[in-house]
Image (cartoon, rainbow, N blue to C red):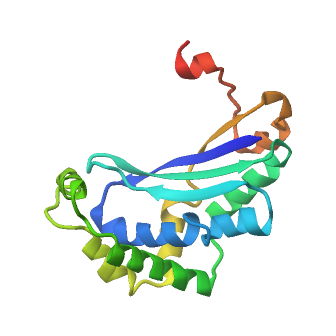
């Protein structure tokens, strides 16, 4: 077994990016109908788990991060990593998938009510973002008019061809080092390197 995480630092925080980020994540990398899951798990059978998310920070002074994960068999490491990096470079188009992604974002906002402890947490988050309103209203109003070109441009500008850090957890003797060499310098870490003991 090998768990792979591909990470790159994104742009500085900007609340105006939230609508396209939400739609991009819904279409490309989160959920069972996303491009990443359908391609790597359902179509190519390369993963037991796969997702990709352009993660927004919880404070306005922090940047976005793109995080892409694929859990695979050790003997499929090279093929799985190539599959993920290919998708990160060029996102395929699915008309049905894009329509479903838009509807998912809209429906999630329609049905996800802010109540009880969420009221306070939402207030704190808004303060951290230097805003005084529910940012979901911007997402709801803008996503319905977005096109595939919007999220394609977003990926090209913020994900494709960005330098990545690739993290792999697995049994060293089972991992094909030659499959990793094209991606850059390989550094092996022990549990002591990671945890300090």
**Quarter-wise, where is residue 31 in the image?**
bottom right
The residue most toward the top is 197
**Horizontal and vertical percent position of residue 132:** 13, 62
Q: Is residue 59 left or right of residue 150?
A: left
Query: Does residue 195 show up?
Result: yes
Compared with 149, 65 (above or below) is above
**Horizontal and vertical percent position of residue 10:** 44, 53
The residue most toward the left is 132
- Image quadrant occupied by the C terminus: top right
- Image quadrant occupied by the N terminus: top right
Residue closest to the eye, 100 or 162 = 100
Compared with 120, 113 (above or below) is below
**Horizontal and vertical percent position of residue 90:** 64, 68
At x 68% / y 38%, what residue is drawn? 168
At x 30% / y 60%, what residue is drawn? 14
**Horizontal and vertical percent position of residue 82:** 75, 55
**Quarter-wise, where is residue 21 in the image?**
bottom left
**Quarter-wise, where is residue 137 in the image?**
bottom left
Query: What is the count of numbered marks?
Result: 0
At x 69% / y 69%, what residue is drawn? 38
At x 28% / y 70%, what residue is drawn? 136
Query: Does residue 90 show up?
Result: no
Residue closest to the eye, 11 or 36 = 36
The residue most toward the front is 116
């Amino acid at each position: 077994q090998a768990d792979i995480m591909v990470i790159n630092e994104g742009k500085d925080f900007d609340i105006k990016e939230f609508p396209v980020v939400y739609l991009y994540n819904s279409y490309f990398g989160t959920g069972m109908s996303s491009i990443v899951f359908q391609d790597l798990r359902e179509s190519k059978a390369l993963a037991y788990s796969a997702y990709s998310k352009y993660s927004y920070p919880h404070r306005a002074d922090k940047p976005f991060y793109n995080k892409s994960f694929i859990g695979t068999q050790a003997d499929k490491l090279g093929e799985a990593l190539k599959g993920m990096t290919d998708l990160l470079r060029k996102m395929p188009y699915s008309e049905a998938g894009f329509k479903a992604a838009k509807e998912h974002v809209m429906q999630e906002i329609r049905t996800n009510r802010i109540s009880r402890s969420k009221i306070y947490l939402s207030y704190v988050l808004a303060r951290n973002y230097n805003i005084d309103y529910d940012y979901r209203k911007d997402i709801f109003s803008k996503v319905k008019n977005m096109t595939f070109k919007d999220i394609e441009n977003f990926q090209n500008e913020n994900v494709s061809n960005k330098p990545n850090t690739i993290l792999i957890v697995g049994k060293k003797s089972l991992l094909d080092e030659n499959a990793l060499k094209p991606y850059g310098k390989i550094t092996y870490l022990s549990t002591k390197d990671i945890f300090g003991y």
